[in-house]
Amino acid sequence: MTASLRVAIFGESYLPYLSGVTVSTETLARGLRAAGHQVLLVVPRPADGGEPPSAGAPGPAPTYAWLPSYQAPPPGPPGYRMPWPVPSEALRTARDFAPQVVHAQSPFVSGLMARRTAQHAGARLAFTHHTRFGDYRHYLGPLAGVAEGTLNAYLGDFWAGCAAIVAPGTTLADEIGLRLGQRRRHRPLVRVIPTGVDVAALQALTPDDLRTRFDFPADAVIVACHGRLAVEKNVAVLMDAFALASVSDPRLRLVLIGDGPAAATLAAQAEQPDLAGRVALPGRMPRLEALAAVAGADIFAFASQTETQGLVLAEGLTVGLPVVALSGPGVEDSVRDGVDGVVVRPAASGADPARALGEAIAVLAGDRERRTATARAARQGAQRFDVARRIDETVALYRQLLGLAG
């Protein structure tokens, strides 16, 4: 039996705010604990001061060190707490913990705290690059161009101070590797380690009866998507694709699970004559409730072009939904085109993305035999996403950084 490691994980945001990053952070912390390692999770204190509920990650809770926090200003969503950049009891606890590895989940305030803690402890610093920050520049208006150049320079410097960078997808890993190759300074290791999912738990969920819940017809073919409703997630293209598909197949219905700044616009579009009664927007749900709703659909559709992994793709496939997705970062790490889903590549033919995606949805909706076979392949192939495998890969990276045998 190999010796346990002492790992301090620093996050810029955390539960109860639900996002791919907060789910990934909890999954890492609890997964490491389940594997027998000692974990200190250093994250912003929830608004109510209590311990947040789990998002459903397997494993025992880590020890928490709560950073003083505040509600992020717009465009930060409600409930998104950020750490104050000040000395705190949490940072003293992290230093006293004497970690061997410090794993940052952000390069910003908590990332700088992680770096200082690693330096103080003589620990190795790892960093998971969860977010394509440049894809959020539209929130900065006329400052976007200047901000992007400054951000890229900052990220390069932060990467240079890390022993390893974890990329959740191969496209991002290749991009990071290319940028690091242009630098003469220290080059950290770059590893592709996606966030794992609790396959057994997700496959044990009871699918929601969406036809009854939303008063859809008994013969409806239901398309679901789960995620933040925002411009950067390309939800407008998804809505347009569905509208086009429903012309070909009037049985189609759409359930968009989540909330965000585009929710009101999407709700207004859903009331237009061509979509009225065909689209449900139930809003934000607890994660496992949302995934039970996804499991009650027939097809998972995805149009985002800003992902590092697209965790919701792995979750949708795990609960047994065939995926129809626009090709983009992270998509083909999860979806096996022609096996458990359809990857649409409009750029290759110059086609309109919404039309190409809509046509693919309509074709799969109209072929029940193919949908059944694809759904079966999705469920049967889900073990490749299992969280225990991802934790093993992460621990192997830590041991490599520390020069320890397996």
Image (spheres, grey):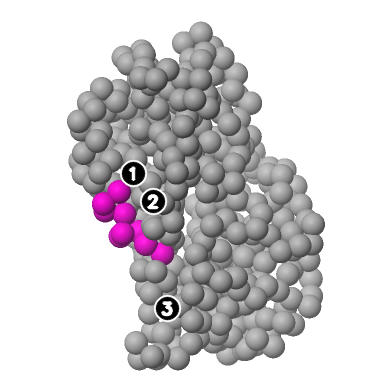
Res. 203 visible in picture? yes
- Residue 48, percent across and down? 79, 57
Q: Amino acid at mark 3?
A: Val
Q: Amino acid at mark 2?
A: Gln
- Residue 180, percent across and down? 41, 68
Q: What is the quadrant of residue 401 in the picture?
A: bottom left
Name the dominant secondary structure of the magenta segment.
Answer: helix
Q: Amino acid at mark 1?
A: Gly
Up the image or down, 350 lies above or below 70; here it is: above
Q: Residue furthest top?
A: 273
What residue is shown at x 20% (from left), y 33% (from top)? 370
Question: Dot 1, how many residues are within 10 Å of its Cα: few (below 14), some (14-19), or many (20+)?
Answer: many
What residue is shown at x 32% (from left), y 16% (from top)? 249
> In the visual, does 199 lie left or right of 128?
left
What residue does disc 1 label?
A: 320
> In the visual, does 66 lie left or right of 221?
right
Looking at the rendering, the stretch of residues picked out in magenta corresponds to 379-387
Q: Earlier in the sequence, mark 3 or mark 2?
A: 2
What residue does disc 2 label?
A: 203
What residue is shown at x 74% (from left), y 76% (from top)? 90
Q: CA distance from mark 3 to mark 2?
A: 26 Å
Query: Which label number is shown at residue 395?
Result: 3
Helix, strand or loop under label 1 = loop
Q: Earlier in the sequence, mark 3 or mark 1?
A: 1
Q: Are marks 2 and 1 in contact (CB under 8 Å)?
A: yes
Mark toward the viewer: 3 or 1: 1
What residue is shown at x 35% (from left), y 32% (from top)? 298
Up the image or down, 373 lies above or below 384; here it is: above
Mark toward the viewer: 3 or 2: 2
